[in-house]
């Protein structure tokens, strides 16, 4: 499908996100032949930059971060020709006058009114400034063609998220606003919908009658790197649970959509958030566990404690690990616990959703067969493995009726011999295509904050006991295991 001529305006054009993610993804899209025939990229920032210097900087980013790191000169030149710089202060109305003039120039040259995408890759406070300035300059007026893209953090708590949504909507219609959660751009995350609703096999058992519990893990090996300043104020719950984990939960628990319309899917997802049982402020520890990594070892190498990281207070009480036990109060899921966890400096990078099925109602096999009894499980591997694994019991060869768990496995690599696009490629293309399905609507953001507020408030009001409470390179604090063990559940062994 041919995309309309498009002007992509990158606020924060000299910053890290543009260099590391946006430009490399746009370049990959260009190589894949998926960019509009006519497009221009305008990087806006405060620093002085000549176009040539900007191109050199971007090329460095592409060579490091694009999927296609072997860059042919002809390809790069064809791309760089479309990229220009506009120096200006984000607060200064003059910047927007210049921007308006540049857009008008482009329209005149192309003899068409181009779509305009304003992507805010800026510090979060700018979301209070840029949309308003764009509106003052009339750059918001065309509802079909003018779009704004916002990155996380999407608020710091419920109040600030509401305020952010209000500010955005004073200048843009909800249909023009694209809030990014990059997890939704991942192929394996999108595949949850395909798997559930394109196959008749699993949907009939996808409910409380057959499912014992669901665990969702987003584990990271990395620490906070150079993001100590940001992370100190955020912590694991805000950084990962409010957005990525909640979105995974929605996709696993939602009701079937009636059509593939963006709002239909988002309605079904927000229903899940609304059905989440509120966590009572008393007894938070029954439902939420926090942790912070101390010194430890990863792949045989010593790594420092969170409190020793750059820009982190030596007395920090910020959590680098969070686990939650949630219930979805509706007919489908009543009584089924959903366990969510995320953490930094865990033994390996691993994102997965596990559907654990109930055991059979009656074990009719000889007693010795039961010794190694394992519940049937479906593992949706998000990353780094990308695929689906079904584990179930089978007869172990030999004279006796002994049972062992075995696996049926689908991997993307074997199933589809083509490279998987980066999440940002998918999302940027969707913005150009004006498809908001994979973006967060205002009500989703607020509903997700609402669920977490009791935990955030309780944690802010009390000093965590025993921080650091897990060594780097381990699977988090013991309390996270206890959270499941109390109901006879466990995280997956070794994960
Ligand atoms: C970001 C968080 O949203 O997601 C980071 O701010 C985290 O702290 C990152 O490292 C993880 O993303 P991915 O795609 O590497 O799993």
Image (spheres, rainbow, N blue to C red):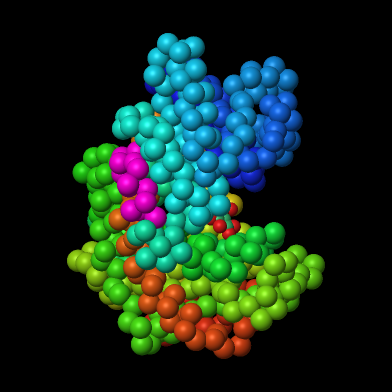
Quadrant of image for the N terminus: top left
Residue 361 placement (x, y as % from top left): 28, 74
Q: Position of residue 256 (x, y in %)?
A: 25, 50
In terms of depth relative to the viewer, which is nearer, 356 or 149?
Answer: 149
Q: Residue at x 52, y 34 (%)?
A: 94
The quadrant of the picture occupied by the C terminus is bottom right
Which residue: 23% across, 40% down? 259
Magenta-drawn segment: 164-176
Magenta stretch: includes residue 175: yes
Q: Identify whether 139 is placed above or below 149.
A: above
Residue 379 location (% of width, % of height): 46, 58
* Percent position of residue 399, x then y: 49, 68
Q: Looking at the rendering, which quadrant does residue 454 occupy?
A: bottom left
Residue 392 belongs to the span the image colors magenta: no
Q: Quadrant of ligand 1?
A: bottom right
Q: Main secondary structure of the magenta part?
A: helix
Q: Would residue 424 be found to the left or right of residue 300 on screen?
A: left
Give left or right: position of 55 versus 231.
Answer: right
From this view, report whether residue 282 is shown above or below residue 328: below
The answer to whether residue 77 is seen in the rendering is: yes
How many circles with numbers are drawn on the protein? 0
Q: Nearer the viewer, residue 255 or 31?
A: 31
> Which residue occupies the foreground of this view, 188 or 223?
223
Q: Relative to 201, is 49 on the left or the right? A: right
Q: Is residue 368 above or below residue 53?
A: below
Between 339 and 22, the residue placed more toward the observer is 22
User: Which of the 4 image quadrants contains residue 26?
Assistant: top right
């Amino acid at each position: 499908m041919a995309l309309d001529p498009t002007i992509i305006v990158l606020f924060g054009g000299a910053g890290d996100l543009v260099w590391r993610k946006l430009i490399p993804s746009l370049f990959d899209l260009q190589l894949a032949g998926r960019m509009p025939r006519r497009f221009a990229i305008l990087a806006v920032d405060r620093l002085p930059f000549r176009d040539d210097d900007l191109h050199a900087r971007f090329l460095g980013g592409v060579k490091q971060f694009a999927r296609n790191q072997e860059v042919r000169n002809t390809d790069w030149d064809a791309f760089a020709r479309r990229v220009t710089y506009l120096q200006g202060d984000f607060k200064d109305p003059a910047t927007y006058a210049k921007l308006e003039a540049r857009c008008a120039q482009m329209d005149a040259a192309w003899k068409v009114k181009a779509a305009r995408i304003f992507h805010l890759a800026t510090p979060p406070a700018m979301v209070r400034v840029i949309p308003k300035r764009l509106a003052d300059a009339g750059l918001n007026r065309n509802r079909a063609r003018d779009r704004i893209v916002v990155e996380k953090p999407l608020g710091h708590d419920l109040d600030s998220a509401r305020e952010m949504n209000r500010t955005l909507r004073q200048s843009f219609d909800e249909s023009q606003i694209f809030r990014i959660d990059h997890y939704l751009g991942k192929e394996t995350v999108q595949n949850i919908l395909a798997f559930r609703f394109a196959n008749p096999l699993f949907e009939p058992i996808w409910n409380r009658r057959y499912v014992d519990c669901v665990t969702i893990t987003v584990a990271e090996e990395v620490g906070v790197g150079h993001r100590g300043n940001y992370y100190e104020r955020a912590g694991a719950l805000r950084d990962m649970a409010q957005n990525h984990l909640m979105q995974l939960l929605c996709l696993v628990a939602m009701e079937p959509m009636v059509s593939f319309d963006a709002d239909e899917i988002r309605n079904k997802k927000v229903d899940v958030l609304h059905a989440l049982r509120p966590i009572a402020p008393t007894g938070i520890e029954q439902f939420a566990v926090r942790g912070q990594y101390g010194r430890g070892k990863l792949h045989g190498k010593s790594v420092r404690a969170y409190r020793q990281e750059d820009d982190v207070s030596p007395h920090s009480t910020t959590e680098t690990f969070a686990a939650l036990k949630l219930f979805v109060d509706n007919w489908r899921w009543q009584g089924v616990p959903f366990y969510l966890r995320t953490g930094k400096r865990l033994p390996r990078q691993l994102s997965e959703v596990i559907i654990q099925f109930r055991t059979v109602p009656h074990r009719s096999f000889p007693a010795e067969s039961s010794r190694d009894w394992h519940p049937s499980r479906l593992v949706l591997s998000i990353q780094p493995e990308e695929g689906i694994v079904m584990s179930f019991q089978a007869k172990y060869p030999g004279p006796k009726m002994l049972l062992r768990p075995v696996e049926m496995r689908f991997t993307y690599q074997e199933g589809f011999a083509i490279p998987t696009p980066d999440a940002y490629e998918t999302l940027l293309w969707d913005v150009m295509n004006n498809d908001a399905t994979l973006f967060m609507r205002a009500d989703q953001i607020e509903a997700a904050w609402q669920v977490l507020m009791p935990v955030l408030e309780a944690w802010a009001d009390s000093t965590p006991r025993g921080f650091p409470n897990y060594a780097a390179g381990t699977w988090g604090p013991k309390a996270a295991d206890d959270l499941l063990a109390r109901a006879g559940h466990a995280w997956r062994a070794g994960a």
